[in-house]
Amino acid sequence: MSAAEKIIAPAPSKKAATLSVDGKTVSFPIYDAVEGQSVMDISKLYAETGMFTYDPGFVSTASCESKITFIDGDKGILRYRGYDIDQLAEKCDFLEVAHLLLNGELPNKKQKAEFDRAITLHTMVHEQAHFLFRGFPRASHPMAIMVGATASLSAFYHDSLDINVADQRELAAYRLIAKMPTLAAMAYKYSIGQPFIYPQNDLGFTENFLNMMFSTPCEKYKVNPTLARAMDKILILHADHEQNASTSTVRLAGSSGANPFACLGAGIASLWGPAHGGANEAVIDMLQEIGDVKNIPDFIKKVKDKQSGVKLMGFGHRVYKNYDPRAKVLHSTCSEVLKELGKIDEPLLKIAVELERIALSDEYFVERKLYPNVDFYSGIIYRAMGIPSKMFTVLFAVARTVGWVAQWKEMMEDPKTKIGRPRQLFTGASPRGFVPMEKR
């Protein structure tokens, strides 16, 4: 914990909430946040009342205390360690933000150089891991490979599995951040039948990733600085997002004492869902289904018809009821990439531009606050860069690895951490006697 965090840490509130159950009144302490909603501590609810709370989707439940990321969905705010996301995306590179998320402070010049070097020296994966990839069919979804490949790192790096040793936790964090782009590029190369490209220590984090994705042994790949900067911004914007489904999965797995590689494998599996990390892949599927700008009016009619089951992918967000702050950054980045690649007139991208225009002007979408989200723009950028849609969620995992390890590390160092064990509302069969088969 940094000095700054110690200063701003909230003091316990003297406020309390009372609850009456069957004539008995019990009191629960309230804790105030530095920003955002206060919380009511109901950890003794069962002991005091014999009851649990019922909260499907955990929409009103704070599962942990964290100092990493703050979101105000109503105001469209996203901050890492107190810094607004647009400032970080415009003024930092990805590893600078990674250092911030892991350590609580932006690095100075010396710290940045040391951190960059430490990550660079861990980008290669064990040579035996190549054989793991070759056990998958070529047609495998890259996310299926990533789940297995990430968890399997625990089989290769035994010197960073003791979660009770701070140095081993840090080493595991560095290895995961460094090796995830390598695994992602390997998954892509394997899917298209090309040889794996080894990382190059003379390249920056993002440049190295693009090189592993697009170069071949036959020809050197020249990294386009505009594309590298766009990718860097995307990674920063996706690096963490508070207690979302995949982060909660990593924390839940970690609460059992599982090693960090296994925890991130679980997180990747959660991220794969189309309601989470798979949303930008769904955006491209939607654009391909529309097929042509002339088909947009009919598509919009179906979206407005609740009986049709057709959804406008890449718009709206469970948390943000205002414009997604990450989308604001990527809006201009998207234009820069399309201009750089000369793809302003590509049919699929024309459809995307027209959909964006309609969503921002049509009262139906404006009233429902269905603004373009980060998935909408990241999908378009990836498409323009020549990255296939099956790789979109993989790139999300590359970015989110930093947030996952920061959240996992914070949880492991929190003395209040307990193994996760949600309760349930049982609505099954009441007690009944066993009936022998001949009498059923």
Image (tube, rainbow, N blue to C red):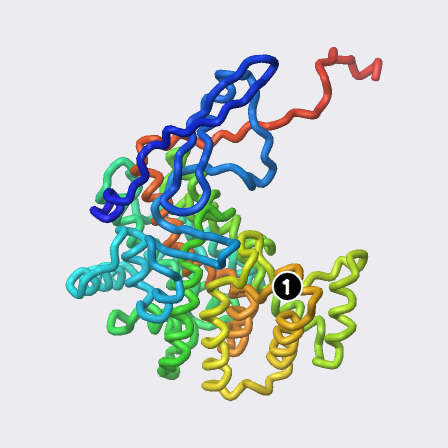
Q: Secondary structure at mark 1?
A: loop
Relative depth, front residue between 179 and 157? 179
In the image: residue 305, left or right of residue 198 = right
According to the picture, the residue beneath numbered tag 1 turns out to be: 313
User: Quadrant of the rendered structure where residue 346 is?
Assistant: bottom right
Q: Position of residue 374 (x, y in %)?
A: 52, 64
Among all residues in the image, which is located at the extreme front? 15
Residue 131 seen anywhere in this rendered image of the structure: no
Q: Residue at x 70, y 80 (%)?
A: 293
Q: Position of residue 419 (x, y in %)?
A: 42, 30
Relative depth, front residue between 160 and 283? 283
Q: Residue at x 75, y 70 (%)?
A: 299
79 relative to 113, above or below: above
Quadrant into which the N terminus falls: top left
Relative depth, front residue between 319 and 394? 319
Q: Residue at x 42, y 27 (%)?
A: 29
423 relative to 150, above or below: above
In the image: residue 310, left or right of residue 63 = right
Q: Amino acid at mark 1?
A: Met
Q: Residue at x 26, y 60 (%)?
A: 119
Among all residues in the image, which is located at the extreme left? 110
Among all residues in the image, which is located at the extreme top? 433
Q: Position of residue 350 (x, y in %)?
A: 62, 81
